[in-house]
């Protein structure tokens, strides 16, 4: 069950602490988080006592059927949040400054014109709320991950030298959808040969090249993403390839062992980074070690060179995904997803990390 009571309590505690009378929700992920249903074009107004969602005709039926019972579902344009703002004499309204567009903000200012209502930035308010997962959220993410693991088993059965990178991506995505994934959690990455040195390369209509094949992809269940990366070898692995793979794997295993509530996000990144740099690949691991996962594929908390001082807490779900990228040669990344607990972490990724040669 979704614990929406807890979500509202936490949001209103933040509002109280920051002198915010109402929150204006515009992003699809926070709309879903606070309403219980999807409406990418909807918005919400949440006051200290009431919660309103505003929906046009396309979404109104779903809204009435699926929304949390305490949310008042309003049909636009018949009902407008500006009426509430004016009648309730809302003094301060919090906006999603990292999400609201310039034109959306202009429309908001126009709507509150003539009232004494002022806007204030919400900053990381919602992203911090969402960083700590409830049981239901963890279950949804695990369900998505199980589907993704099935897709990995599937691709190992059907992969062959005549396949293109796009076909590999298509096989992964088709399998996931056939097994209950709502949609890919993000654009599937399947890059081989020299293209595997591109951490976020785009699959090409070319046959798989010898060397590494990196597959980074995820499924979605109840709106929640999963995220995993496995790198296999097309053909035989030479000594250099084995060294790269085993260095990434050691960095990953040691970093995973460091994950627990209270651990410093920057220090966890450093565990993996020191191993990779120490093995002779200084500067070849140019991205952060990991990120949170939830309704969005990239959420808080991050674990990178800028996150010293930030501590993990129980309920965070984070990825651990070190990589080595050698421009002109190849690249390799291995990624698991872990749920942080009081005394360690549960690795949510049940998928072999042995070096696989095809
Ligand atoms: Mn990731």
Image (spheres, rainbow, N blue to C red):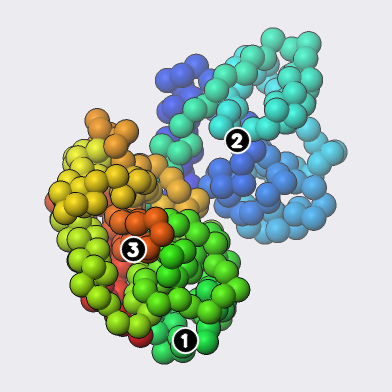
Q: Position of residue 73 (x, y in %)?
A: 70, 45
Q: Position of residue 101 (x, y in %)?
A: 68, 32
Closer to the camera, 193 or 345?
193
Instruction: Give the distance between the C-alpha atoms of the residues marked 2 and 3, in whole angstroms.
Output: 33 Å
Mark 1, residues whose alpha carbon is within 10 Å: few (<14), some, or many (≥20)? few
Q: Are marks 2 and 3 in contact (CB under 8 Å)?
A: no
The mark lying in front, picked from 2 and 3, is 3
Element class at badge 3:
strand
Mark 2, residues whose alpha carbon is within 10 Å: few (<14), some, or many (≥20)? few
Identify the residue under disc 3: 332
Q: Is residue 328 above or below residue 79?
A: below
Q: Is residue 93 above or below residue 211?
A: above
Residue 99 got which mark? 2
Identify the residue under disc 1: 161
- The quarter in which the N terminus is drawn is bottom left
Q: Position of residue 63 (x, y in %)?
A: 69, 53
Q: Quadrant for residue 265, please give it.
A: top left
Q: Quadrant for residue 77, please give it.
A: top right
Q: Is residue 325 above or below residue 115?
A: below
**Labels 1 and 2: the sequence-earlier one:** 2
- Please tell me which residue is depicted at 72% across the width and 31% down the height of the picture: 104
Number of on-image labels:
3
Element class at badge 2:
loop
Instruction: Give the distance between the C-alpha atoms of the residues marked 3 and 1, in whole angstroms.
Output: 19 Å
- Please tell me which residue is depicted at 48% across the width and 78% down the height of the picture: 208
- The quarter in which the C terminus is drawn is bottom left
The mark lying in front, picked from 1 and 2, is 1
**Labels 2 and 3: the sequence-earlier one:** 2
Mark 3, residues whose alpha carbon is within 10 Å: few (<14), some, or many (≥20)? many
């Amino acid at each position: 069950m979704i614990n929406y009571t807890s979500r509202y309590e936490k949001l209103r505690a933040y509002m109280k602490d920051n002198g915010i009378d109402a929150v204006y929700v515009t992003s699809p992920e926070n709309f879903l988080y606070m309403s219980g249903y999807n409406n990418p074009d909807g918005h919400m107004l949440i006051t200290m006592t009431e919660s309103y969602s505003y929906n046009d005709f396309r979404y109104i039926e779903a809204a009435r059927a699926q929304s949390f019972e305490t949310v008042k579902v309003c049909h636009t344009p018949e009902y407008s949040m500006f009426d509430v703002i004016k009648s309730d004499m809302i003094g301060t309204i919090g906006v999603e400054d990292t999400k609201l567009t310039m034109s959306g903000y202009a429309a908001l200012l126009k709507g509150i014109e003539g009232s004494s209502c002022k806007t204030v930035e919400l900053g990381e308010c919602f992203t911090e709320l969402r960083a700590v997962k409830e049981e239901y959220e963890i279950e949804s993410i695990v369900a998505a991950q199980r589907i993704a693991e099935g897709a990995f088993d599937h691709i190992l059965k059907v992969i062959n030298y005549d396949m293109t990178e796009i076909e590999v991506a298509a096989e992964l995505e088709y399998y996931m959808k056939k097994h209950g994934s709502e949609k890919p959690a993000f654009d599937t990455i399947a890059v081989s040969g020299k293209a595997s040195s591109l951490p976020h390369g785009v699959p090409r209509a070319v046959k798989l090249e010898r060397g590494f094949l990196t597959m980074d992809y995820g499924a979605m269940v109840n709106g929640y993403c999963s995220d995993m990366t496995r790198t296999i070898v097309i053909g035989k692995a030479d000594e250099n390839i084995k060294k790269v793979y085993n260095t990434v794997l050691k960095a990953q295993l040691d970093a995973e062992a460091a994950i627990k509530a209270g651990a410093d996000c920057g220090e966890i990144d450093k565990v993996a980074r020191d191993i990779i740099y120490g093995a002779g690949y200084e500067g070849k691991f140019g991205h952060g070690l990991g990120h949170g996962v939830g309704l969005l594929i990239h959420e808080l908390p991050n674990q990178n060179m800028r996150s010293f001082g930030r501590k993990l807490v129980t309920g965070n779900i984070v990825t651990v995904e070190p990589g080595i990228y050698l421009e002109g040669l190849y690249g390799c990344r291995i990624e698991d997803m872990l749920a942080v607990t009081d005394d360690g972490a549960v690795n949510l990724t049940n998928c072999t990390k042995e070096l696989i040669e095809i």
